[in-house]
Image (cartoon, helix red, strand yellow):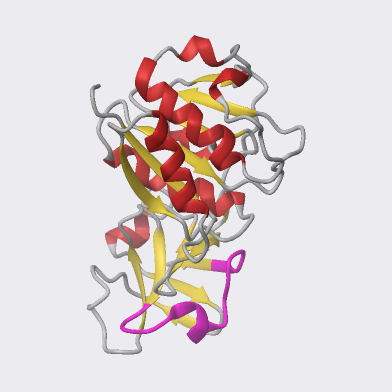
Amino acid sequence: MAHPIITLTTDYGTSDHLVGVMKGTILKINPETTIVDISHSVMPFDILDGALTIGQAYRHFPPKTIHVVVVDPGVGSQRRPILVTGDQHYFVAPDNGVLSMVYECEPKVTVRHITAEHYFLNPVSNTFHGRDIFGPVAAWLGKNWQTPSFGEEVSDYVRFSLPKPKVANNTIKGVVLKVDNFGNLITNLTPEDVPQVVAGTNFKITVGAREIDKLAQTYAHGAPGEVLALIGSSGFLEISVNKGHAARALSMQRGAEVTIVLG
């Protein structure tokens, strides 16, 4: 690929110089790179939020895209930098579980511990591996595509699974995984977990002190301020407020329980 695409997903925010410096480092090594920001608003130090963000985004990019994911509370410690090759995409990240959703989505991955220090900036800071390791490795990968040159394969990489719904008799219990920028409560429940809800069978969703007994098709299928349940673009059941902020309206946050009673 003459003009590689590199995406960036970080918890750096945009008020400081960090993102710009990462981009400058990449372009200095490979000026032909197209850099795309997925998000720099991952919650600080929040590996699960980073995992969800890249897991929902990467498949919408062309084959051979290189995804740099830096949510790295262990920067400067013994945690490994890794290069992951999926079916059609590459990932450069710390080995702390931030690629867990990628591992769940990809049929097969090859994970390499990045040890080839000649690809790093010199010297390497103990606090900014996005600039000194992850960005440069992605830039060099976009030049040579020689993944074995970056390090040996490993099998003991860090990963975690999303919490599973709990089912007992006619009750399904899920949890809120994420509160998005609009205040929508994104749960761990997929249409496959709640087919009766998708089909419109009798059900009652309890969130906080509110109850919902129908599934909306869009955010606009309700009066302003009405609490809604719908399957969002992420593929999960969401609790929303039309033209409002569900998390604030319901006094709920990540980890809160959502209960569905069928029949």
In percent of width and height, residue 85 lies at 44, 22
Extent of the magenta region: 241-258
Q: Of 95 and 198, which appears nearest the observer?
A: 95
Q: Is residue 80 magenta?
A: no
Q: How many marks?
A: 0
Name the residue: 60% across, 17% down.
Answer: 116
Do we see residue 78 in this rendering? yes
| Quarter of the image with the N terminus in it | top left
In percent of width and height, residue 168 lies at 59, 55
Q: Of 163 and 59, which appears nearest the observer?
A: 59
* 51 lies above or below 63: below
| Quarter of the image with the C terminus in it | bottom left
Q: Of 13 and 259, which appears nearest the observer?
A: 13
Name the residue: 36% across, 29% down.
Answer: 30
* 241 lies above or below 80: below
Q: Of 133 and 25, which appears nearest the observer?
A: 25
Name the residue: 28% across, 41% down.
Answer: 60
As drawn, is 126 to the left or to the right of 229?
Answer: right
In percent of width and height, residue 232 lies at 33, 60
* 157 lies above or below 229: above
In percent of width and height, residue 206 lies at 51, 75
Q: Is residue 249 magenta?
A: yes
